Image (spheres, grey):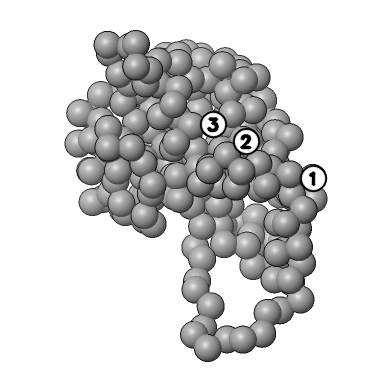
Amino acid sequence: MTNNRSPKRGASKRTKSSDRWLARQRKDPFTKKAHADGRISRAHFKLEQLDTRFRLLRPGMRVLELGAAPGGWTGYVESRIRTKSQARHGLLVACDFREISAARATVIVQGTLGEPRTDAQIGLALGNAPVDLVLSDMAPNISGIRTADQALSMELVALAVVTAQRWLKPGGSFVVKILQGEGIDDWVRDMRKLFVKFRLVKPQASRLDSREMYAVAEQFRTPSQQARELR
């Protein structure tokens, strides 16, 4: 999820930064592969690589996806939790304030996470029952001001954690995008109290010059287990 603004109408000149971005896009192997394979975005390969390594997804799972637009992760999740030979399909609830490209079976909640109306819609879509996995690819609209971008990123991460705590079943898993920077160390310590297993990883499909990483947290602790960790 990003807070992107459309360029002004009539703008005929591109900035140097946009020219560099377009040049990088043309050279990026995962962007090329996404286009060749008919994928919505290169983000597909990030989740695919995380899933291959950590075995996050399987048929029949209940999944909540945050920051789902435009649908790069959504399509991959759909392919993993539902199979033609599987009588019992999984459930995917995808949330974003922007439009999401998804299969008919996916439940879309269009709204801003954290707003009461959006949170209530998520609960309704999930039947107020817990999920096996919470995914968050939410990210701020990068301004280039490192401290401001980091603060916004951590706000979105905190929102994703609260949502995961609300909906994850004991033993469930959580994947969230995070930017390397101030506040990470304290956050990691807190997360280790919530989950038995925790790792920060950078998928191959993430650009080398990006501060983007993904936290993969597994085996969500029960409230009593969390209490013991706090002692």
Secondary element under disc 3, as helix, strand or loop, is strand
Q: Of label 2 and label 1, which has the lower sequence position? A: 2
Q: Which residue is mark 2?
A: 46
Which residue is at a point 65% across and 41% down the rendered structure image? 33
Which residue is at a point 34% across and 17% down the rendered structure image? 84
Label 3: how many residues lie within 10 Å, few (<14), some (14-19) or many (20+)?
many
Indicate the amino acid at tag 1: Leu
How many marks on residues?
3
The disc placed on residue 177 is none
Indicate the amino acid at tag 3: Val
The alpha-carbon separation of the residues under discs 1 and 3 comes to 20 Å
Residue 93 on image: x %, y %:
33, 35
- Residue 36, quarter of the rendered image: top right
Number of the front mark, 1 or 3 = 1
Q: Which residue is mark 1?
A: 208
Q: Of label 2 and label 3, which has the lower sequence position? A: 2
Q: Which residue is mark 3?
A: 175
- Residue 25, quarter of the rendered image: bottom right
Label 1: how many residues lie within 10 Å, few (<14), some (14-19) or many (20+)?
few
